Amino acid sequence: MTPGVLYISYDGMLEPLGQSQVLAYLKRLAAERPIHLISFEKPDDWADTDERDRVRQDILGCGITWYPLRYHKRPSSLATAFDICHGIAVGGVIVFRHRIRIIHARSYVASVMALALKRLLGVKLVFDMRGFWADERVDGGLWPRNGYMYRAAKWFERRFLLAADHVVSLTHAAVTEMQRFAYLQCHKPSFTVIPTCADLARFHPMPRPTMGRPFVLGYVGTAGTWYLFDEVAASFAQLLRQRPDARFLIVNRGEHAYIRERLTAAGVPAESVELTTATHSEVPRLIARMDAGIFFIRPVFSKQASAPTKLAEFLGCGVPCLGNAGIGDMAQVLEGEQVGVALRAFDQASLAAGIARLLELVAVPGISERCVSAAQRHFSLDEGVRRYGHIYRLLAQDRPIQLT
């Protein structure tokens, strides 16, 4: 019998992130081996019974065994500790009952659970780090660098890297950085780079009218924490100076008041903006209305390990992007593939020049096809599934895995 895998995610499967970056992979991987999935669902998401039933049936139909646990938020440290203990207990039962040999842990909190299960039950551990999470918390202003939480998270990061049977990184830049860590010089784990992928069967170009419509700039996803939304708003203000009829289509959950406030501060008229909420399944059709996408992320240390999901989804839909350098391998993709613009400064002159370059790029014949081709080379879900399946097969066979 093919050995099963226990996948642990602290993100919920009722969230768009869980559906695009966990379920999209696991549905295909479940065709090759049994997949058991532990996730932590937020109460508000769980209360949406229609969506909950839809996702449950979707997961069941793919042959995945789902164990949805409740996510607890407050008090922060104690709530997370409770969730970790709950996950370890449930995971231990699953490993014992189904003779699981591989645990795949998504990011750091899930990896605490997986590390405990590895120590207790001797399973193989895939540390799917999803970026330098502890440093992201500091860079995002959520933790002080000299604080207990950061030091504890970095202590765990060291244990994960030393104990992992395989490490998955989103970017080559992060692997290069980790290979410099002093404690890994005598014990370098095997790495595979799997960028944030998109289901290009869903995120693909759709017909859009080309005559008699304004230029539409698009923004999808979170606007706070380490996203530079003020600079995004200033960029759209610059766009209005160059294309007064332009429209700004923003797809976001839960931050509408903040977004309206920042757009007003940037002098963007309300009538130029459409601000909406969408489920993950609705996002491709909204991107199809956009001529170009935009997002900026603070170019801090932790972001060299980041591969934004929205880049893959924009390009898959044939939409070029305005982004910024210093974020994983993003600048190399945008400019190397000539599918976008990567800014290196955010002063008004740089924003105006970036918008002008973006408008020129959008007008290039065949730009949509070029974006799709770049997405297929860098962010194909098929390639991501192939690499994950390769890791599982070799760990199940106790064979070494080559760096990719």
Image: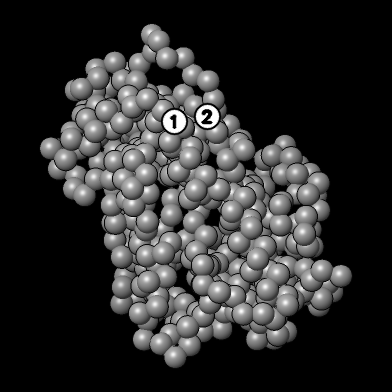
Q: Position of residue 178 (x, y in %)?
A: 40, 75
Q: Indicate whether 151 appears above or below 110.
A: below
Judge by depth and name the residue closer to the eye, 246 or 253: 246
* Residue at point 43%, 61% (across, down): 171
Q: On the picture, is 89 further left or further right than 1? A: left
Q: Position of residue 404 (x, y in %)?
A: 51, 67
Between 208 and 216, which is closer to the camera in this rendering? 208
Residue 8 rendering spot, x and y as whole percentages = 65, 65
Question: Mark 2 and 1 residues: CB-CB less than 8 Å, in contact?
Answer: yes
User: Can residue 88 be seen in the rendering of this structure?
Assistant: no
Q: Is residue 292 left or right of residue 43?
A: left
Label 2 – label 1 distance at C-alpha: 8 Å
Q: Is residue 162 above or below residue 302?
A: below
Q: Considering the image in quadrants, where does the N terminus appear?
A: bottom right
Q: Earlier in the sequence, mark 2 or mark 1?
A: 2
- The residue identified by callout 2 is 205
Name the kind of residue labelled 2 in the image: Pro
Quadrant of residue 320 within the rendered picture: top left
Q: Which mark is residue 195?
A: none
Name the residue beneath numbered marker 1.
368
Q: Residue at x 43, y 54 (%)?
A: 307
Residue 63's place in the image compared with 250, above or below, is below
